[in-house]
């Protein structure tokens, strides 16, 4: 019989529920516990796990109680960014107090809002000897992994390693107010989503079976902008829907980074990572490309194969039943069937469950999470200074982006503000 891992969740929101759904395809694990500061949300997430038959999940009154549950072998951290350090500290303290033991701790992106926070998270878990997993679903997407494996096995083997990778994540904006708040989230779309694209381009450029360290980022050029959500009409809409005032404390809704890599076999490679909260389309769009001397691959998550058409006569409530971050209910619409599979959550969670059971080595650990935050902070600093920067972790150890400090002022506010509005 397959040994099973009991998993508890810290957090009960959108991403936690995505993970819960993915465990329908993971034979090695059961979802057995949930803690959230909102007890009703925790009860709801636990009920979803029971409804999907992925585990006899129960809501817990505290993080310490979650750790103390003898059924919980590992915890998935899916809470908000501003609670990350406190949540990890509570887990570690419960272990030190002898409330319970864990086999592993997995964390959603980012590991911290700053390098200092990310490093503090790593130090806390290291102090009690916890195995770690850095959750990055896009590295596990089936199309990416299949294409990467084939290109390296056929194209790179015959004509040389790839030299250019591109990745993007784009949608119309986050679900919850705290994502839009620079202080709570740690920035804007760069901190929220460029973590995915920056790590994905490095992964694509890394030979399968070799560590990420064989493709070393050395220079970063970052760019941030507010393209949509500081326009007056959208500022008003954002304040009405999310309670966030982008006239007073704006965050970037577009970010791009060009990353120069040096490879262990003596080559230069380039990664281009883009992300946006100002994308207008059917819904969330993930895309990637990998190019080499005589080959290329491309992937677009909205090229899903299944399409539905609804005429103007079809009326219904807004929803996300066709694709995440769905933007319309009529017309010709792509459908992403099985999103937890398509976006890599199923393969990701199967891998980390097996890693914590000792059946395979973790592909990503908290050390990789620290590296990602270093790259993000270098991109922010590059954008603020308007120049390419060498990637130097020590130089951004205590760096906090202007967006997170509330001092960023996009030119769009001054150029687009109407007379009489806040300037």
Image: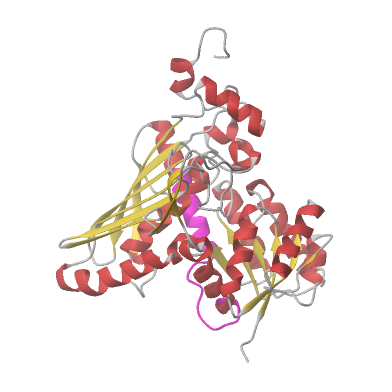
Residue with the most extreme front position: 313
Residue occupying the point 60% across, 43% down:
175
Q: Image quadrant of residue 132?
A: bottom right
Q: Image quadrant of residue 120?
A: bottom right
* Horizontal and vertical percent position of residue 86: 72, 53
**Which of these two is toward me, 229 or 409?**
229
Residue with the most extreme bottom position: 1
Residue occupying the point 28% across, 72% down:
150
**Which of these two is toward me, 269 or 421?**
421
* Horizontal and vertical percent position of residue 174: 57, 42
Q: Image quadrant of residue 221?
A: top left
Instruction: Using the rendered image of the protein, determine whether residue 136 is visible from the camera's viewpoint.
Output: no
* Horizontal and vertical percent position of residue 32: 73, 72
Image quadrant occupied by the C terminus? top right
Q: How is the image coloured?
A: secondary structure
Question: Is residue 228 one of those drawn in magenta?
Answer: no
Q: Report the side of 61 relative to 236 (left or right).
A: right
Magenta span: chief secondary structure: helix
Q: Report the side of 77 relative to 264 (left or right).
A: right
Instruction: Using the rendered image of the protein, determine whether residue 373 is visible from the camera's viewpoint.
Output: yes
Residue with the most extreme top position: 419
Image quadrant occupied by the N terminus? bottom right
Residue occupying the point 75% across, 69% down:
57
Looking at the rendering, the stretch of residues picked out in magenta corresponds to 355-378
Residue occupying the point 78% across, 61% down:
63
């Amino acid at each position: 019989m397959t040994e099973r891992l009991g998993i508890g969740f810290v957090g009960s929101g959108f991403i936690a529920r995505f993970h819960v759904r993915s465990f329908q395809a993971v034979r090695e694990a059961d979802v057995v516990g949930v803690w959230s500061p909102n007890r009703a949300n925790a009860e709801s997430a636990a009920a979803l796990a029971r409804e999907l038959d992925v585990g006899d999940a129960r809501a817990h009154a505290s993080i310490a109680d979650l750790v103390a549950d003898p059924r919980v072998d590992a915890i998935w951290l899916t809470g908000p960014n501003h609670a990350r350090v406190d949540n990890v500290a509570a887990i570690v303290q419960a272990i030190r107090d002898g409330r319970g033991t864990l086999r592993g701790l997995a964390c959603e992106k980012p590991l911290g809002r700053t390098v200092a926070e990310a490093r503090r998270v790593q130090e806390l878990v290291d102090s009690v000897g916890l195995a770690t997993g850095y959750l990055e679903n896009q590295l596990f997407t089936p199309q990416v992994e299949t294409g990467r494996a084939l290109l390296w096995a056929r194209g790179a083997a015959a004509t040389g390693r790839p030299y250019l990778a591109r990745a993007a994540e784009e949608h119309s904006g986050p679900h919850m107010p705290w994502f839009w708040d620079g202080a709570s989230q740690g920035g804007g779309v760069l901190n929220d989503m460029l973590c995915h694209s920056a790590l994905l381009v490095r992964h694509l450029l890394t030979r399968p079976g070799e560590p990420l360290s064989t493709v070393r980022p050395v220079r970063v050029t970052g760019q941030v902008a507010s393209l949509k959500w500081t326009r007056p009409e959208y500022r008003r809409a954002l304040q009405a829907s999310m309670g966030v005032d982008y006239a007073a404390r704006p965050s970037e809704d577009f970010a791009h980074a060009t990353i120069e890599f040096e490879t262990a076999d003596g080559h230069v490679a380039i990664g281009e990572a883009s992300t946006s909260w100002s994308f207008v389309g059917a819904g969330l769009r993930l895309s990637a490309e990998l190019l080499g001397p005589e080959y290329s691959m491309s992937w677009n998550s909205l090229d899903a194969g299944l399409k539905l058409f609804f005429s103007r006569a079809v009326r219904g409530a807004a929803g996300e039943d066709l694709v995440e971050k769905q933007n319309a209910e009529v017309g010709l619409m792509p459908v992403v069937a099985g999103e937890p599979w398509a976006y890599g959550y199923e393969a990701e969670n199967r891998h980390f469950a097996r890693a914590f059971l000792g059946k395979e080595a973790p592909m990503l650990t908290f050390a990789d999470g620290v590296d990602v935050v270093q790259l993000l902070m270098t991109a922010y600093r590059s954008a603020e200074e308007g120049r390419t920067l060498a990637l130097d972790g020590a130089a951004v150890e205590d760096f906090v982006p202007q967006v997170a400090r509330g001092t960023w002022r996009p030119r769009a506010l001054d150029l687009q503000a109407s007379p009489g509005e806040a300037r």
